[in-house]
Image (tube, helix red, strand yellow):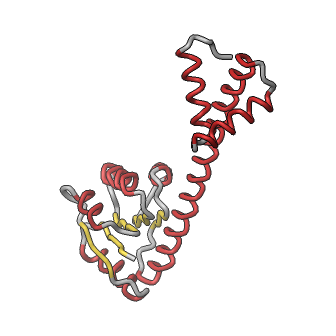
């Protein structure tokens, strides 16, 4: 597992490195948050990112939250102090573990495991949500296409569905694709849409 530590002070980064080495990780890279550091991190292709921010200013925190959005990787953020707004901003940015006053090497492994676990669970929920949205959108398109077939060809709902499904199978396409093409063609031919 490749781990990137974002830190601008060597002393705090060494605590994280010690904890990671003791947990058996050795592919560790420390990146200072200056210049084009996001692109440096992207080139490293990390599996996990640990951010050690100490006592960040609001600007620094916001910059780190942008990093979180850009990377789409499990991220654990260590800060010395926080407030409700910072915590909410971290959650909104997808930070997997937001740790206040918890920078000790013996805590690094459990927090790393937590960050990876939460990221995986969140990614799975996002994929399920995206799939549900796609299915809902597909159903709406198919329903519109069925209505067109029922109106234009005098079919009942089941026959319209069967015709769409058969056409999709024959064309080796998804039913939603065939339905969308039918809706577009109907619109172009001025047949109107139900």
**Residue 79 at x, y percent in the picture:** 40, 64
Asked if residue 112 lies left or right of residue 139, the reply is left
Q: Residue at x 57, y 30 (%)?
A: 180
In this picture, is 42 found above or below 113?
A: above
Asked where in the image residue 179 lies, by quadrant, the reply is top right
Above or below: residue 6 compared with residue 57: below
Q: Is residue 92 above or below residue 161?
A: below
Residue closer to the observer: 118 or 159: 159
Looking at the picture, tell me which residue is in the foreground, 6 or 88. Answer: 6
Considering depth in this image, is 43 or 183 the residue closer to the camera? 183
Q: Quadrant of residue 156?
A: top right
Residue 116 screen position, x and y as percent? 50, 69
Relative to 72, residue 20 above or below: below
Q: Quadrant of residue 40?
A: bottom left
Q: Quadrant of the C terminus?
A: top right
Q: Position of residue 6 (x, y in %)?
A: 30, 66
Place of residue 57 in the rendered image (x, y in percent of width and height, measured from the top left): 32, 53
Question: Residue at 55% of width from left, 69% of height from top?
Answer: 117
């Amino acid at each position: 597992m490749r781990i990137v530590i974002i830190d601008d002070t060597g002393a705090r980064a060494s605590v994280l490195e010690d904890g990671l080495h003791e947990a058996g990780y050795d592919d560790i890279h420390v990146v200072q948050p200056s210049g084009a550091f996001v692109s440096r991190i992207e080139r490293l292709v990390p599996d996990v990112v640990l951010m050690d921010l100490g006592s960040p200013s609001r600007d620094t925190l916001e910059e780190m939250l942008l990093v979180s959005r850009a990377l789409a990787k499990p991220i654990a953020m260590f800060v010395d102090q926080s407030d409700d707004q910072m915590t909410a901003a971290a959650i909104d940015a997808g930070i997997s573990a937001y740790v206040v006053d918890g920078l000790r090497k013996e805590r690094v492994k459990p927090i790393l495991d937590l960050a990876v676990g939460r990221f995986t669970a969140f990614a799975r929920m996002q994929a399920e949500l995206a799939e549900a949205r796609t299915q809902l959108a597909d159903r709406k398109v198919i329903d519109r296409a069925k209505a067109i077939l029922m109106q234009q060809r005098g079919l009942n709902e089941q026959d319209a569905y069967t015709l769409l499904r058969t056409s999709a199978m024959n064309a080796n396409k998804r039913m939603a694709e065939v339905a969308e093409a039918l809706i577009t063609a109907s619109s172009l031919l001025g047949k109107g849409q139900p």
